[in-house]
């Protein structure tokens, strides 16, 4: 009778190879799902631009001592990625004032917590004053070394629809103009609209005009 010998040593390498193949297939499936979730030609994950933004100056006050058009917040791009103005927006918040309603048609000034949102930083989405204050953005990018000048009257003309949205003290039906109280602190946040994440944040005191 011929004895049959069992070679257990040959089984282990085969099982190991099968496990490696199975693991490779699983990983490929995970990667494919991630890519499909972001579009066939998209990247696996969106990335937020990295840039250092600093408030260079904030000057102004609230009416009637200071007009809204005399309020300025100046932001400097100190370094990092150029920011595409189509996908970048800015939010200012602090103690101040805005005008509710239309000038000369029963409107009135309201004082309190002001939030001014710049939804469109491109030249086409804002008024002539904004464009003249910001010649550097004609290329659609906010790059290192460039300044962005925001003004309390950056709404189209203070009465018409604007890509600047201002709310104050619970009122959202404002003329979208604003002024921040001198000596108070305002918070400035720069967002990437693609990822809805904060690119930069800064806090600054408002110095009086003059």
Image (cartoon, rainbow, N blue to C red):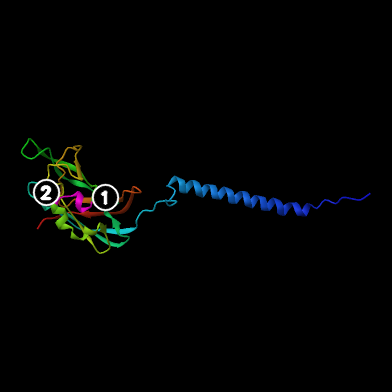
Question: Which residue corresponds to mark 2?
Answer: 68
Return the residue nearer the eye: 106 or 128: 128
Whether the magenta-drawn stretch holds residue 123 is answered as yes
Q: Position of residue 115 (x, y in %)?
A: 22, 44
Residue 170 is left or right of residue 210, and the answer is: right
**Callout count:** 2
Return the residue nearer the eye: 41 or 179: 41
Say whether residue 190 is visible: no
Residue at 59% x, 51% y is: 24
How many residues crowd around disc 2 within 10 Å: few (fewer than 14), some, or many (20 or more)?
many
- Answer above or below: position of 136 versus 161: below
- Quarter of the image containing the C terminus? bottom left
How many residues crowd around disc 1 within 10 Å: few (fewer than 14), some, or many (20 or more)?
many
Residue 110 is left or right of residue 14, and the answer is: left
Q: Position of residue 40 (x, y in %)?
A: 44, 48
Which range of residues does the magenta coloring cover? 121-127
Residue 47 is left or right of residue 68, and the answer is: right
**Distance between mark 2 and mark 1 Cα atoms:** 21 Å
Q: Determine which quarter of the picture holds residue 81.
A: bottom left
Q: Position of residue 28 (x, y in %)?
A: 54, 50
Q: Residue furthest bottom?
A: 145
Return the residue nearer the eye: 97 or 15: 15
Q: At numbered mark 1, what does the secondary structure look like: helix, strand or loop?
A: strand
Q: Position of residue 84 (x, y in %)?
A: 29, 55
Residue 48 shows which numbered tag? none
Question: Which residue corresponds to mark 1?
Answer: 89
Q: Determine which quarter of the picture holds residue 79.
A: bottom left
Return the residue nearer the eye: 14 or 89: 14
Whether the magenta-drawn stretch holds residue 133 is answered as no
Q: At numbered mark 2, what does the secondary structure look like: helix, strand or loop?
A: helix
């Amino acid at each position: 009778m011929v004895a049959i010998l069992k070679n257990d040593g040959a089984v282990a390498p085969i099982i190991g190879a099968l496990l490696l193949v199975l693991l490779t297939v699983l990983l490929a499936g995970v990667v494919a799902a991630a890519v499909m979730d972001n579009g066939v030609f998209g990247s696996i994950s969106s990335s937020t631009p990295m840039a250092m933004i600093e408030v260079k100056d904030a000057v102004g006050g609230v009416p009637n001592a200071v007009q809204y058009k005399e309020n300025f917040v100046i932001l400097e791009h100190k370094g990092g990625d150029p920011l595409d103005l189509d996908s970048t927006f800015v939010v200012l918040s602090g103690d101040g004032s805005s005008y509710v309603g239309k000038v000369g048609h029963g409107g009135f000034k309201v004082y309190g917590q002001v939030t001014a949102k710049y939804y469109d930083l491109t030249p086409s989405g804002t008024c002539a004053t904004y464009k003249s204050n910001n010649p550097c953005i004609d290329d659609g990018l906010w790059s290192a070394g460039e300044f962005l000048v925001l003004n309390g009257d950056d709404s189209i003309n203070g009465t018409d629809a604007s890509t600047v949205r201002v709310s104050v003290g619970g009122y959202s039906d404002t003329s979208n103009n604003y002024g921040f109280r001198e000596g108070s602190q305002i918070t400035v946040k720069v967002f990437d609209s693609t990822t809805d994440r904060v690119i930069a944040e800064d806090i600054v005191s408002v110095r009086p005009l003059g």
